[in-house]
Amino acid sequence: MRAVGRLARHEARLYVSLGLWLTRRTQGTAGGRAFGYARGLGATLLGLAFVCVVETVGVSVLLRDMPIAHDVLLVLDVYTVLFVVGLYAACVVRPHVLTPDAVRVRYGAHVDLRIPLSAIGAVRRETRMTHPPAEDALDLAVGSQTSLTLELTEPVTHVTPLGRRRDVTVVRLHADDPGGLVRALMRR
């Protein structure tokens, strides 16, 4: 039952993100410098939303003589379109944030990992397209690509959307400006 509650909170964050995106605001960036990562997601997710809209129109035409099925699928299709646009909006309004004492590594409404700067042993710009699974690594790829690797001197606990905890010592992430993020981290 806790898992259902956690998923509901994540879904609610998507819709809050949609509102923030429409008003061109960000979340959780006060007191820090934001580094976006959603540039590579825009075309894919908004293209998927367009396909969902086309599918909605097609299903509406096919089911015009079955009003109950038409109405049920229309509600589900509108929900799907809002969900997909909310996924993109969450990535735009929740960028990575560098504060004086930590870096918040985020991925939409699903990941918000605070890493103390004192726990970062090495940072490097490293473009990777493949990410073999590793128990102690967290890979936050955008378009199957990461552009930055953080090696930690001590484990940081990552909590998944369903509440599973695991300690990570390597974090790979994507940033629209990986060089700028590396320089900012090196200065701190």
Image (tube, grey):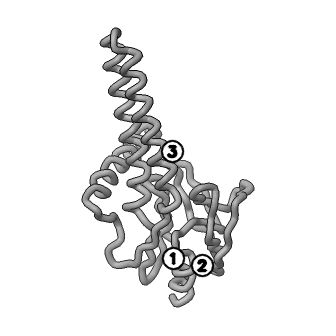
User: Looking at the image, do the residues carrying marks 2 and 3 touch, with CB atoms under 8 Å apart?
Assistant: no
Give the residue at mark 1. 116
- Find numbered disc 2 in the image and state the secondary structure of the residue it sits on: strand
- Dot placed on the residue nearer the N-terminal end, 1 or 3: 1
User: Looking at the image, do the residues carrying marks 1 and 2 touch, with CB atoms under 8 Å apart?
Assistant: yes
Give the residue at mark 3. 162
| Residue 3: assigned label | none
Q: Count the marks: how many?
A: 3
- In the rendered structure, the answer to whether residue 62 lies left or right of residue 24 reads right
Residue 165, by quadrant, is bottom right
Amino acid residing under circle 1: Pro
- Residue 26 is situated, as x and y percent measured from the top left of the image, at 33, 65
- Residue 25 is situated, as x and y percent measured from the top left of the image, at 29, 64
- Find numbered disc 1 in the image and state the secondary structure of the residue it sits on: strand
Q: CA distance from mark 1 to mark 3?
A: 24 Å
At horizontal 64% and vertical 76% (from top left) the residue drawn is 125
- In the rendered structure, the answer to whether residue 22 lies left or right of residue 3 reads left
Amino acid residing under circle 2: Ile
- Asked whether 35 or 46 is in front, the reply is 46
Residue 103's place in the image compared with 46, above or below, is: below
